[in-house]
Amino acid sequence: MSAEFSKPVRRPSETFDRLFAGSDPAEVSRAAHATATALLARVRDEADDDAVDRLITFTDRHGIDDIAELWSRSPARSLPGSLWRLYLVQLSIHDDAHTAALIYERGRAELRSADPIVAGAPIPAGPQELVTLIDTIMRGAFTGDFAVALDRAAAFCRVQAAGATHVADDYEPTEPHRSSELTTRALRLATYASDLAAAARLWRREALE
């Protein structure tokens, strides 16, 4: 990853909240689950480094729309829903690694838990370190213990959520609009953390579908 973290590909900020229409919701759901299961199984069976690299850098090269059409409407605590959230977290870091690093470091300083250790970022974690971390978590999802990758992503989201909340408090007196944006980001990240942690528990019980 180069030092230039913003690239002109199809990634509107509202992607986090976007839903894509489908003519048959049941068919869309079946396709989402089938593609997620097949993709994960194929990569694990073949152990092809090039294939893994392509998946990790997919949103850098193609944006998010193709993945969104497959997985964005899946339940949060499902295999396609989990992969969708992993890609969204990765996307948010790649899009603005400087802001991500700012709120991550604030969260690490404020949060009294093991989450920074579980997430695995170095101390301090700058923009490039966070890009490397989230790509490592993504690689682990495709090649390692999927539940561990989900737990690391959940911990990462909790640290970011804490940081965004505290930075929002700083902005409240002078820039309430910015504060509101960060509060929304914190709520979203906290929800993702809960969903990813729940998905990890389901995966360990062989119940994540």
Image: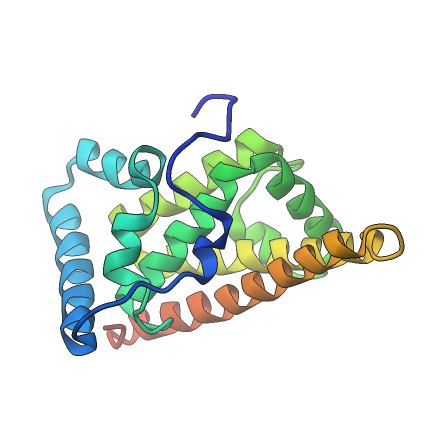
Q: Nearer the viewer, residue 52 or 7?
A: 7
Q: Residue furthest right?
A: 173
Where in the figure is residue 27, as x and y percent of width and height?
A: 13, 73
Name the residue at 43% across, 25% down: 1
Number of callouts: 0
Compared to residue 67, the image places residue 74 above or below, namely below
193 sits to left or right of 84: right
Image position, residue 52 (x, y; %): 23, 39
| Image quadrant in which the C terminus is located | bottom left
Say whether residue 146 is left or right of residue 34.
right
Residue 20 vertical position relative to residue 97 in the rendered view, above or below: below
Residue 145 vertical position relative to residue 75 in the rendered view, above or below: above
The residue shown at (36%, 35%) is 60
Question: Which is nearer the eye, 69 or 130?
Answer: 69
Q: Toward which corner of the image does residue 166 lie, by quadrant? A: bottom right
* In the foreground, 129 or 171: 171
Residue drawn where x is 46% and y is 57% of the image: 16
Q: Quadrant of residue 111?
A: bottom right
